Amino acid sequence: MLYRTIDPERLPELLCKMPKAELHMHIEGSLEPELMFALARRNGVAMKYPSVEALRGAYEFDNLQSFLDIYHEGTLVLKTEQDFYDMTCAYLERAKADNVLHTEIFFDTQTHIGHGLAAKVVVDGLYRACQDAPAKYGVTASLILCFLRHLSEQEAFACLEEVMPMREKIVGIGLASSEAGHPPEKFARVFARAKELGFRLVAHAGEEAGPEYIYSALDVLHVERIDHGVQAIRDPELVRRLARESVPLTVCPISNLKLKVVHRLQDHCLGALLDAGVCATVNSDDPAYFGGYINENYTQTFAALPLNATHAYQLARNSFQASFMEEAQRKQCIERLDKVFETFYRP
Ligand code: HPA
Ligand code: ZN
């Protein structure tokens, strides 16, 4: 294992410089208060908070639901295709700064349809930013549409139908929002339909709710990746299965801390999952709300846990391995990762 010979003092620099993919980031969760206020002005939307500082000061959460309530309010400033484009470009610029080569962006249309927008306004703005991303930022980006699980399966079917004219702009389908009380089974039929339509499938499971949601996401929804999945640690047999079947987990450590899924990063199970052979990845979830983009997630987690350069390499490699990119691109990304690691080896 050559990468064990990297100077541990250079680990924070390595974490930032290593190429990586981000696979769990809700675009509405990347909307920084500064841009939110600018969009509110542009669209004539009244803000509930008097200033950027007051809004940021309200970002204290007890659990997932208390976050979702504020997050939902933030989406009220988004009105036009250009708003969705600008929000996505702002994220892509931050992603580039963190040496993200590829990102699979979560979004939803149900929130915005609820505010009177058409799904096309949302998808067109996001997709135009994704198309411009390689030339503008050197990043490739694709889109994953999340159904909101607190709404009905029938509403998810309507959502799927509305995006069908834009089928080619969306790589996958996911499941987000309030987890407890809304198990994967509720969406069995609409996920089966999405699969028939050729979408890649993922779902949030085991963020707050228990391992049984992860089993259902795998066995009932037939997803390829689990978003969060950290509650798997309570079930050793499930951890063994995730490792054996190479089911990736898109873990978001700072999110888990801010939503009180864990009380200290020192208690986070990321290291245990990696050491058990699970294809875990590091991601930012809602960086504007949780105060950390992807590199901050890496550096804070590595500062809190006994993780080394081998783990860093594994996490970055896992992010490419778990992504929905084409094989040729995957190979190139891993080659770029290996090159950066080479420059960090001790002589
Ligand atoms: N969990 C569920 N829904 C979400 C999240 C999350 O972490 N972020 C944005 N929507
Ligand atoms: Zn999420």
Image (cartoon, grey):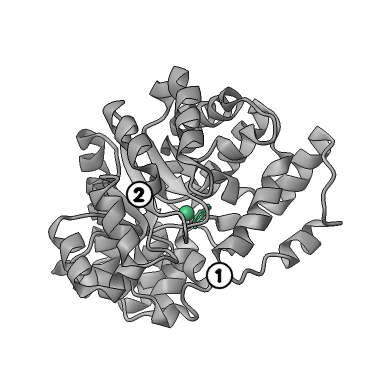
Q: Examine the rendered structure and indicate whether residue 206 appears above or below residue 145.
A: below
Task: In this rendered view, identify the residue nearer to me: 97 or 38.
Answer: 38
Q: Which of 169 and 101 is in front in this view?
A: 169
Q: Is residue 43 left or right of residue 62?
A: right
Q: Which amino acid does label 1 sit on?
A: Lys
Q: Label 2 belongs to which residue?
A: 185
Q: Where is residue 276 in the image (x, y as percent from the top left)?
A: 19, 71
Q: Left or right: 91 with respect to 116?
A: left
Give residue 221's position: percent from left, percent from top. 30, 45
Q: What kind of element bears circle 2?
A: helix
The mark that comes first in sequence, 1 or 2, is 2
| Quadrant of image for the C terminus | bottom left
Q: In the rendering, at what x and y percent does residue 3 appear?
A: 20, 68
Residue that label 1 marks: 258
Q: Does the residue labelled 1 lie within 8 Å of ligand 1?
A: no
On screen, 201 above or below 48? above
| Residue found at the far top of this picture | 165
Give, as a three-letter code, the residue at label 2.
Answer: Glu
Is any part of residue 205 visible from this angle?
Answer: yes
